[in-house]
Amino acid sequence: MTVASLIAWVNEGTALFERTVAGMDDAGLEAPSALPGWRRSHVVAHVAYNADALVNLLDWARTGVPTPMYSSPEQRAEDIEKGAALPPGELREKLITANARLGANLAGMPADAWERQVRTAQGRTVPASQVPWMRTREVWVHSADLAAGAGFHDIPQGVLEGLLADAAAKFSTTPDTPRVSLVATGGPGRWEVGTGDSAVQVAGALPDLAAYLLGRPLSGRLEPAGPALPAWL
Ligand code: ZN
């Protein structure tokens, strides 16, 4: 995947997220999201602050001065609560401004800065070229989490395959994860998940396989329904 095509996924997913938010009235913004304990305004605040956090990583790569995504996990959670409590107009504006700022920073990144190492909020050291993929995951998955029309079926196939690969890699090192073979119906895809002894084979459409691994509601169904998995992040 080239950085340019990752940035195209970011832009496309950002447009979907913004369209979905624009389609809600102020009361809709306060309705529950698909994420436990989060209203839609929490999801919007998180996506806006995540854009700021990723600008920090791009700054870090460009300048060499370590600027972490968030000053602490507590700060991250506090910002989301504060952002969700903003008047709706301010929260909407915060989202648009943060997205535009990240977009400008992605577009203006010097070519030689993409390979510089930065550290994510999870403590992984990665090249800055991972930042567009990190944002791709956020905007597409959280568009579905808004529970306002957008869903995993809107996510491009390449993004779904990336999500499945990420989640499968993560679950291959998570203790006590049941072993599951995921088979995409109507496609060549196959993903092995988990660390248990005997594998269950589960078949379904790509969007439903990804939703299952990420612990999101399915729009279709899996055959058979897979065993419960640990939370993915
Ligand atoms: Zn997120």
Image: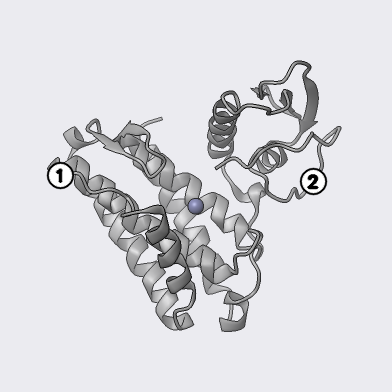
The residue shown at (63%, 58%) is: 35
The residue shown at (58%, 68%) is: 40
Comparing labels 1 and 2, the label whose residue is closer to the camera = 1
Pinpoint residue 61: horizontal percent, then vertical percent: 21, 40
Quarter containing the C terminus: top right
The residue shown at (85%, 33%) is: 223
Question: In whole angstroms, how far apart are the C-alphas of marks 1 and 2?
Answer: 46 Å
The residue shown at (49%, 45%) is: 137
Where, by quadrant of the figure, is residue 98 drawn?
Answer: bottom left
Where, by quadrant of the figure, is residue 184 drawn?
Answer: top right
Quarter containing the N terminus: top left
The residue where tag 2 is placed is 220
In this orientation, which residue lies closer to the viewer: 65 or 213? 65
Where, by quadrant of the figure, is residue 188 drawn?
Answer: top right
Q: Farthest residue in the top direction?
A: 197
Quick check: marks 1 and 2 in contact, CB under 8 Å? no
- Within 10 Å of disc 2 (Cα), the crowding (few <14, some 14-19, many 20+) is few
- Within 10 Å of disc 1 (Cα), the crowding (few <14, some 14-19, many 20+) is few
Q: Amino acid at mark 2?
A: Gly
Q: Amino acid at mark 1?
A: Val
Return the disc, 1 or 2, that comes first in the chain's sequence: 1
Pinpoint residue 177: horizontal percent, then vertical percent: 68, 28
Q: Farthest residue in the right direction?
A: 224
The residue where tag 1 is placed is 65
Q: Secondary structure at mark 2?
A: loop
Q: Is residue 153 left or right of residue 202?
A: left
Q: Is mark 1 within 8 Å of ligand 1?
A: no
Q: Is residue 199 left or right of residue 62?
A: right
Tell me if I can see residue 168 in this picture: yes
Does 164 appear above or below 134?
A: above
